[in-house]
Amino acid sequence: MTKHERINKLKTFVRNPYVWPGGYTQIMLASDGGGICHKCVKENFRQILESTKNAFLNDDWAFEDTFINWDDVDLHCDHCSERMPAEYEDSVEELGEQMREETLKHQSYEDEIDV
Ligand SMILES: [Zn+2]
């Protein structure tokens, strides 16, 4: 992405954090690799814009890109530390439940053949 494209993407993102189609919430990827939630991007838009325009500021606020948190259930905003929920959180939990049931089934099977 060129600087110009990044600035445009940042402006689009600050107006609307949701992607279409799907309605997933995007998160800002900062130049230092951290994730910043939409609320913080909105609150610090001027600073982020300046940093993105002036790479020499090098203050970690520059906009790199956006991303969607699919399955990291422990992802926190680099700025406000608020947790940014994963889009697939429900299915991750469901999967965990399924695996637990499978393990229980397996265990009772082993108990049976032990007899
Ligand atoms: Zn935040």
Image: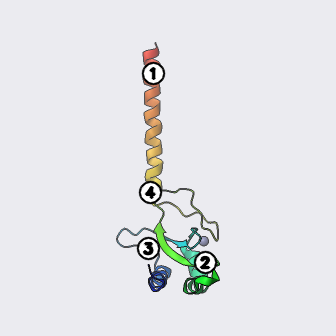
User: Is there a contact, CB below 8 Å, between mark 1 and mark 4?
Assistant: no
Question: Where does residue 62 sit, x and y in percent of width and height?
Answer: 57, 79
Dot 1: what SS? helix
Q: Which residue is mark 1?
A: 110
Q: Residue at x 51, y 75 (%)?
A: 64
Which label was assigned to residue 47? none
Which label was assigned to residue 88? 4
The span from disc 2 to disc 3 (Cα, nearest Å) is 21 Å
Label located before the other in sequence (2 or 4): 2
In this picture, residue 57 sits left or right of residue 28: right
Label 3 lies in ligand 1 vicinity (Cβ under 8 Å):
no
Label located before the other in sequence (3 or 1): 3
Where 108 falls versus 55 (above or below)? above
Label located before the other in sequence (1 or 2): 2
User: Is there a contact, CB below 8 Å, between mark 3 and mark 1?
Assistant: no
Amino acid type at image mark 2: Trp
Give the residue furthest to the left.
21
Which is more foreground, mark 2 or mark 3? 2
Question: Where does residue 50 sit, x and y in percent of width and height?
Answer: 59, 87
User: Is there a contact, CB below 8 Å, between mark 2 and mark 3?
Assistant: no
Q: Which residue is mark 2?
A: 61
The span from disc 1 to disc 2 (Cα, nearest Å) is 55 Å
Where 35 falls versus 7 (above or below)? above
Q: Residue at x 46, y 51 (%)?
A: 92
Label located before the other in sequence (1 or 4): 4
Dot 3: what SS? loop
In this picture, residue 13 sits left or right of residue 74: left
The span from disc 1 to disc 4 (Cα, nearest Å) is 33 Å
Q: Which residue is mark 3?
A: 18
